[in-house]
Image (tube, coloured by chain):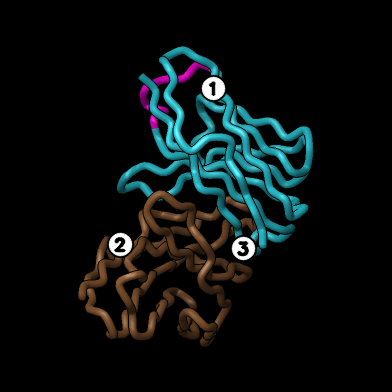
Amino acid sequence: LAKTTQPISMDSYEGQEVNITCSHNNIATNDYITWYQQFPSQGPRFIIQGYKTKVTNEVASLFIPADRKSSTLSLPRVSLSDTAVYYCLVGDETGGFKTIFGAGTRLFVKA
Amino acid sequence: DVKVTQSSRYLVKRTGEKVFLECVQDMDHENMFWYRQDPGLGLRLIYFSYDVKMKEKGDIPEGYSVSREKKERFSLILESASTNQTSMYLCASSFGRPEETQYFGPGTRLLVL
């Protein structure tokens, strides 16, 4: 199964841009890359998804290089409320549903 | 808005008890999932279902079973609860394709004594 590797934790200050990189060396041709955010005592929620190049929405940007072996979630001007765990997911290389969440990256935003 | 609800937020059971965790979604999603989340391990997939009465094992199905008799409801069953099943259990649902967004419930924190 495709595996992702992310930093365990990151610290930032309010107003800074935060970039979280995820490596997924074994990503399959058909796999999308999806990022979720999870606050304490809540289920994860979708942030952004992409297949290649760059995707931007009202919350974040996702940068995917041509080889797709990594991706970077970019959070512009973070606030205290962005303190959460961020998960990078790629699909099951067989095209099934066994996506792997991994341990995620714990982002702590300080005032 | 998609809504995924779970029957309990907190549950305390004794070793050997049979435990039912219920999940209901209101968006007519084909797929439903059960995960458990433990510190440092992220979310691990227990079982998923892509249609009524269909189920497939995830990464850690041992000690669990599931039931999906209706499209909107997916139940996780611990036949004989053990202390190592103390965890946060998260249910999710999604539309047809694997890359579709999964919508999660609030989770059930289960303590097995």
Q: Are marks 2 and 1 on the same chain?
A: no
3D distance between C-alphas at marks 2 and 1? 31 Å
Q: Position of residue A16 (x, y in %)?
A: 28, 85
Residue drawn where x is 39% and y is 30% of the image = B86
Q: Which chain is cyan?
A: B
- Looking at the picture, which amino acid does disc 1 mark? Val
Task: Report the Cα–Cα distance between label 3 and label 2.
Answer: 21 Å
Please, which chain is the residue tagged with disc 2 on? A
* Cα distance between the residues tagged 1 and 3: 28 Å
Q: Nearer the viewer, residue A40 or A70?
A: A40
Q: Chain of mark 3?
A: B
Using the image, determine if residue B58 lies above or below residue A42: above
Which three-letter amino acid code belongs to the residue tagged 3?
Thr
The region drawn magenta spans B80-86
**Circle 3 residues within 10 Å: few <14, some 14–19, many ≥20:** many
Identify residue for label 1. B19
- Eyeballing the image, is B89 above or below B95? above
How far from the left and from the top, in percent, is residue A21?
35, 74
Q: Are marks 1 and 3 on the same chain?
A: yes
Q: Is residue A61 magenta?
A: no
Kindly identify which residue carries mark 3.
B101
Q: How many marks?
A: 3
Which mark is on residue A106?
2
